[in-house]
Image (tube, rainbow, N blue to C red):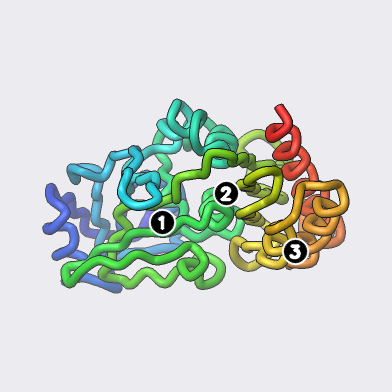
Amino acid sequence: MFPSEFEYLAPTTLDEALSLLAEHAEDAKVLAGGQSLIPLMKLRFAAPAILIDINGLPGLSHLQEDKRGRGFLRIGALVRNAALERSELLKARYPTMAAAAPLISDPIVRNQGTLVGSLVHADPQGDWGSVLLALEGEVVAKSATGERRIPATKFFDGPFTTVLRPDELAVEARVPAPGPRSFGTYLKLERKVGDFATVGVAVSVSTERGVVTRAGIGLTGVGPANIKAVDAEQALVGHRLTDKAIRRAAELAAAASEPRTDVRGSADYKREVVRVYVARGLHQALAAKAA
């Protein structure tokens, strides 16, 4: 099939892009990597009257740390997944993101697809949503009238929906800088390389003197949106990563999941994978701390 007819606009400045969004709002879609939008348009599941291509905008390709306050990582809206996969900064400082980047779809998609675009698409089987939830990240959105910072916990509003307004452009994602004793990983079960996650689990843990000071657990593919396993996180904080604590957190994470039976497996099977993957990720954190 071919997409329905649309008007193509390619602004050259951010202000111009925001002005176009303000003018056209509900009738427009933003094109960055296009790895989700273009297939939907070809199948006519999406039929925007106007396509606003932001690939020519300057200042949206940054991948850098900001030292203000506690510090945080800034990922611009045009940073490709392939750049994240190759990033030495992620490998050295942001292990959960470094583990997830090579697992995003396949190399062809990673060359064009973007982290911010994945967040805006809000697919419940999207990997970056769970990573951002585990790392307590946020999305920065701009419109012609101002800017707002939206925590990941408030950004997703259901399957394929977010709280982003039609006149807003997600310009970057931000992730707090890790503490000196932090570990993270991303574990993904897929039927074949490049497939959507049957189950994905993002884990991030910070410790001080052997005691967990912060824990983040995000779940992929087991609910109507990416899930932050809050009870499991809270069960870890203030405790050492003992086998008992890990087992309890894994059970709570499995209980927080809301899987459905489909061609990828039964709900019970997916819930068990959540339990196993959370335990595995936390045991990896324990091993890294001991190393």
Query: Where 4 sits versus 127, above or below?
Result: below
How far apart marks 1 and 2 lie (CA) works out to 22 Å
User: Residue 18 at what x, y percent from top left?
Assistant: 18, 62
Determine which residue is flagged by label 2: 127
User: Residue 191 at what x, y percent from top left?
Assistant: 73, 40
Q: Nearer the viewer, mark 1 or mark 2?
A: 2
Discs 1, 3 touching: Cβ within 8 Å: no
How far apart marks 3 and 2 lie (CA) works out to 16 Å
Q: Earlier in the sequence, mark 1 or mark 3?
A: 1
Disc number for residue 68:
none
Does the rendering let one see residue 147?
yes
Observer-nearest of 192 and 210: 210
| Residue type at numbered disc 3 | Pro
Q: Residue at x 16, y 54 (%)?
A: 14
Q: Residues within 10 Å of mark 1 (few under 14, many from 20)?
A: some
Determine which residue is flagged by label 1: 41
Disc number for residue 259:
3
Left or right, residue 80 beside residue 197: left
Does the rendering let one see residue 265?
no
Q: Residue at x 45, y 45 (%)?
A: 177
User: Residue 186 at what x, y percent from top left?
Assistant: 64, 42
Observer-nearest of 232 and 140: 232
| Residue type at numbered disc 2 | Asp
Q: Residue at x 68, y 60 (%)?
A: 233
